Amino acid sequence: MVSEIKNKNWFARHRIITLLILINLFGFFWMIISPSIYLADNSSSSDKPSSSVNQPVQEVYLNKTYNDLFSIFSDDSTYTDLQKENIFNNQYKGRYVKWTGEVYDIDASILDNIRLYTKQRGRGQYDFSGSDAVIYMNKDQYNKLLQLHKGDEVTYSAKLDGFGGFIDTSFYMSDGKIV
């Protein structure tokens, strides 16, 4: 009888393990949902044209490679986080890039957005970081995306929305199109 009561309180007796499990579950949930929340928060009404007539979006393209931006925004950069935010917001945010990368994965988010994950740079033997770019693709790209496999080379254009990452620097983009 006493051993049954002790077994029922396993979580109480193993508080540190229970806490670690809860932290891991929260972290996993946050990694899944945060890019969707980030992009939903950044699509404010101020980014949309004020008139009710559909106007074509002016796509301003940067003549910058992934490596150009990575050298500025990576952890190895000499810029502080505050400086990086300022540079990104003033020089890169809302502008388009046309890059070629390797398909890392393609999926649909909880909010039914289609995401293309790409690797843009070579990896070292012990570099286990994920994708370098997360591109929220336009829904009309669905059939083109179905033709792609992990490891395929893909050229795309997309609008820069943000940067950041847990292990390494990733760029977050929207309005993605296969070129």
Image (cartoon, rainbow, N blue to C red):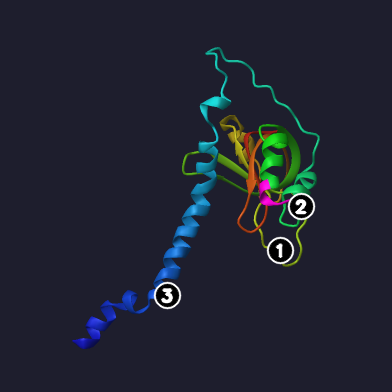
- The nearer-to-camera label among 3 and 1 is 3
Residue position for label 3: 16
Task: Name which residue type carries label 3.
Answer: Ile
Q: How crowded is mark 2: few (under 14 residues within 10 Å), some or many (20 or more)?
A: few
Magenta stretch holds residue 137: no
Dot 1: element: loop
Asked which secondary structure carries label 2, the reply is loop
The residue to which callout 2 is attached is 121
Magenta part mainly helix, strand or loop?
A: loop
Q: In the displayed image of the protein, which residue is found farthest to the left?
A: 1
Looking at the image, residue 174 sits to the left or right of residue 45; the answer is: right
Query: In front here: 60 or 153?
Result: 60
Q: Which amino acid does label 2 sit on?
A: Arg
Quadrant in which the C terminus is drawn? top right
Instruction: Say which residue appears at 72% left-offset and 53% top-offset.
Output: 74
> Do the CB atoms of the residues marked 3 and 1 lie less than 8 Å apart?
no
Residue under pointer 1 = 127
Q: Which residue is drawn at 80% across and 45% down?
A: 68
The amino acid on which the numbered mark 1 sits, given as a three-letter code, is Asp
Instruction: Locate residue 169, reporting x and y percent.
Output: 68, 52
- Could you tell me if the residues under marks 3 and 2 are in contact, i.e. CB atoms within 8 Å? no
- Which residues lie in the magenta part? 78-82
Above or below: residue 131 compared with residue 108: below
User: Distance of mark 3 from mark 2, alpha carbons?
Assistant: 39 Å
**Which x, y percent locates residue 76?**
75, 57
Closer to the eye: label 3 or 2 = 3
